[in-house]
Amino acid sequence: MENSKKISRRKFLSLSLLGVGGVALISLNPFSKSTSSNWRFFTNDEGVLVDALAEQIIPTDESMGARDAGATNFIDKQLMGPYIRYQETYRKGLKAIQETCKTNFKKSFEALEWEEQTKFLQSMEAGKIEGSNWEKGFDKEFFELIRSHTMQSFYGSPRHGGNKNNVSYKMMRLDYPVIIGQNRYKV
Amino acid sequence: MENRHVNAIIVGAGAGGGVVAKELSVAGLSVVLFERGAWATYDDIDTDELNSQRAHALSNGYGPDNVRNKRVKIYPDGSSKIVLPTEAYSNNAACVGSGTVSYGAMAWRYMQEDFKLRTTYGHVEGSTLEDWPISYEDLEPCYEKAEWELGVAGDDSQNPFAPPRNKPQPMPPFSHNKEAQMLHDAALRLGFHPFPIPMLRNSVPYGGRPACYRMRTCAGFACPVSAKAGTHNTVIPIALESGNCELRINSVVSEIIVNDQGKITGIYYFDANNKKQKQTADIVIIAASATETPRLLLNSKSKFFPKGIGNENDWVGRNLQGHAYTGAFGIFNEDVFDDLGPGASVAICDFSHHNKGIMGGGMLANEFIRMPYLFSDIRPPGAARWGAEHKDFQRKNFKKVAQVIGPYQEHPVFDARIDVDPLVKDFWGIPVARLSGFRHEKDVEGCKFMSEKAELWLKEAGAIYTWQNVGGGKGLSGGQHQAGTCRMGNDPKTSVTDKWGRVHSVPNLFIADGSLHVNNGGFNPALTIMALGYRVGGYIAGEWSKGNRFK
């Protein structure tokens, strides 16, 4: 793990001078499933689905929702770190959602109407999704996982890749950074 | 190279072990203090909620780590599962100071009744509730030492139910935040007796450390200015300065060594490089927590102790208790949150004992500030757990919700226990702790009673909508307030140690943590664990000076 994070400063500088720093860093990661993906763990298709799921869990209203605040980035990042143990659950769960949607609606999840998406997730939450992709209880378990991870992305510290510009703290009228007493530089 | 023989080994640098280290090293004994974790600092996690010891989503900021540690839990339906520290250690920490680095720092003395539970309530079917072998009066001088050496802010004279004391707490109490002031006023209207919660936190400069500046991130976090007192910034530094104490961090003790005469001569441990090492000593003191202490005793099997040390009568690991947290929430019309941390500030002890038909009881207090992620799980029954409605609740009510909560004193249950798993081992190859059993069915009644009082209190304070969260229930106890697994007592058949924390069957083995608690009071246990550290440490040092070598 440690090695994958390390890239020499010189190499980084030369890459960023070429104007491809961000993308290059990711594609150099040997843990990426696909060199063409924009993500560390997710495929591009999975990324689109996680965006749609996160947007359902914390939707955009008068303030930014979880998708735009970086939920997919947060989850993707943690799956290569502290949540490495959930990699297979995500791969299996995301595939199961898409296959069930294609069987039942002939569409991918993200192409469903908003209300249809909501209903689908409500069925997952209640443990009522049927089909060979869902062993007993897996629909509920996977929904809980993605629900809690989306909450973490949106309400946790921006240092982990979500909650862009402290959007949730602003929404809750919570001053951040804390301004009393000894203030510190926040990364 | 072999480690030099010392007078005393202490396993665990938490609330109990840190105090014992100071008592012994200042008295002139040579000491090695073992800690499985590292030194923690504020900057390790800063104000990052997801890594705090309270939310422990991405990690336990103050240990233990998910990579090398695990436990096994057996659930009420009989199924068992391997669990990681972030999943099911319930805030248990592993660092120098352990839980006292990131705790909320409430500084409660247990009440006189708590030491005489059997005398007060009689036998309860299905429970092992019992009197302690010591009274409150026996422990009072040790409470006083803990309050003065670590530093407590409070004023017991405002609490008519507080047990008698010889000396006041050393620092004045904290002022209330807005929510606590509203609850204070409401409590008076209801005829309750509100007072400021005693805290191991500086209200004024004390012990060379500055006063608290009221961070919102306190419970679950280290203090940026060391205003919160733990053993890591009080007694452990004194122990180290004595020149007699060596602190060995990142060192995991795996077994107590028994020689071929059946005597205890030291411990084996894995050092920071995971190499197995041996340390010998005249005396061994285990203060590894009510989960890890019995695990170590049970993992130390020999022909002299075939069932584990101290376990001749199968009492090691039994009577695992924690607290059944119970209370209520209220939504107010206006903001009650004024960002004056740490939040918990006002308490009542009106329901701590002598409630008709209820065994025990507990204190009730307003809750520590919940940061946004933890708040996302706080909703009335039936409210949306996600989606637009959930987000809107978060936006509208984060500053309008108050919570009153308390630690209900559980009925000790013999079958609620720690043992070691026969198959599962940790990173070092040490059999892991296995937790099993249920809470007593009567705990729910006590919790329901207290939750009703909490709800009443919130309503009187002006809450426009309230709901209860009732604790107890059929489930495993233990967790952050773990206690009771090496009970002290006068009868070796029904306890593990004597009234000085010495294991009945072994002259030079002591225990000094929450494992000793016969029952766990209706209060946060940290100050009681510290007081027991002074009792056990003071006893050993006193005997040592008289020439007793515990052979």
Image (cartoon, coloured by chain):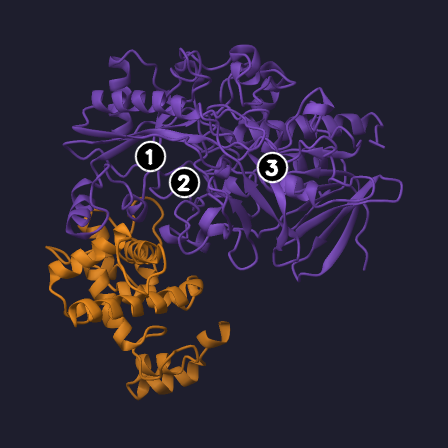
Q: Mark on residue A152?
A: none
Instruction: Give the number of the disc on residue B343.
Output: 1
Q: Give the label, 3 or 2, closer to the camera.
A: 2
Whether callout 3 and callout 2 share a subunit is answered: yes
For residue A46, what is the image quadrant?
A: bottom left
Q: Position of residue B229 (x, y in %)?
A: 50, 36
- Pointer 2 and pointer 1 on the same chain: yes
Answer with mark 2 or mark 1, whichever residue precedes in sequence. 2
Disc 3: host chain: B
The quarter of the displayed image where residue B155 is located: top left
Q: Tell me where residue B412 sits by quadrant.
A: top right
Number of the label disc, if any, that sits on residue B219: 2
Q: Residue flagged by tag 2: what amino acid is it?
A: Ala
Front residue of B499 and B338: B499
What crowding class fits label 3: few (fewer than 14 Cα within 10 Å), some (14-19), or many (20 or more)? Answer: many
Residue at 18% over, 68% down: A110
Q: Nearer the viewer, residue B236 or B271?
A: B271
- Residue at 16% across, 28% down: B464
Q: Residues within 10 Å of mark 2 (few under 14, many from 20)?
A: many
B459 versus A158 height, above or below: above
Q: Position of residue B319 (x, y in %)?
A: 58, 30
Q: Could you tell me residue A70's position as x and y percent?
A: 25, 64
Give the residue displayed 56% in from the left and 54% down from the top.
B69
Residue B268 visible? The answer is yes
**Residue at the spot 70% in from the left edge and 41% down from the top edge:** B297
Secondary element under disc 2, as helix, strand or loop, is loop
Q: What amino acid type should be assigned to the residue bearing mark 1? A: Gly
Q: CA distance from mark 2 to mark 1?
A: 9 Å
Question: Residue type at mark 3?
Answer: Val
Question: What residue does disc 3 label?
Answer: B235
